[in-house]
Amino acid sequence: MPTDTKSSSLDYAGIGRRIREKRREKNITQEMLAETMDISMAYLSRIERGKENVNIERLLIIAETLQVDVGELISGTIPGETGLEPYFWEEIKSVLRDCTPEKQKLIYNVAKIISGIDFKKEKKIMRNK
């Protein structure tokens, strides 16, 4: 039985972006982080741009150096935090970008139904604005 590699693959571009953001927040240069990891700055730059996949061992070193949970680097969420995970925003935008305006509206309406938004109440609010 074939496996769905897309659903199990990691978003390396997102991981790299989060590494860069956290590194900058901590005022750590690429040179400093690369030295800690015992890799070249060019390699770290490719990781941060999502051009190079980072293995779990190096990801753990990065998380420890940046003093963040490794899960935050992988998923973009802080453990115990609630709400929509930031990585979903990019996935949702990507899906919507490829849809016609009609399909976008349909997706929006389905999302409202699933989330329990009351259409009648919302329409009344919109008319009163």
Image: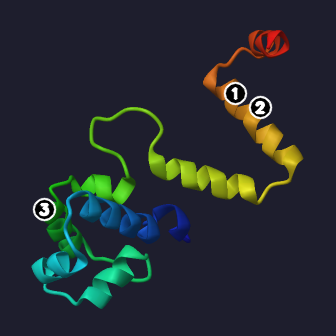
Q: Are marks 3 and 2 in contact (CB under 8 Å)?
A: no
Reading the image, the residue beneath label 1 is 112
Above or below: residue 92 compared with residue 106: below
**Residue positioned most to the front:** 27
Identify residue type, mark 2: Asn
Q: Position of residue 111 (x, y in %)?
A: 68, 33
Report whether residue 53 is seen: no
Q: Residue at x 34, y 61 (%)?
A: 21
Reading the image, the residue beneath label 2 is 109
* Left or right: residue 55 compared with residue 76: left
Label 2, residues with CA under 10 Å away: few <14, some 14-19, many ≥20: some
Labelled disc at residue 54: none
Reading the image, the residue beneath label 3 is 64
Above or below: residue 44 compared with residue 11: below
Marks 1/3: CA–CA distance: 40 Å
Q: Are marks 1 and 2 in contact (CB under 8 Å)?
A: yes
Q: Residue at x 15, y 77 (%)?
A: 32
Looking at the picture, tell me which residue is in the foreground, 51 or 2.
51
Q: Residue at x 44, y 33 (%)?
A: 83
Above or below: residue 35 compared with residue 6: below
Identify residue type, mark 3: Glu
Marks 3/2: CA–CA distance: 42 Å
Q: Nearer the viewer, mark 1 or mark 3?
A: 3
Query: SS at mark 2?
Result: helix
Sooner in the amino-acid sequence: mark 1 or mark 3: 3
* Left or right: residue 111 compared with residue 54: right
Q: Position of residue 82 (x, y in %)?
A: 38, 32
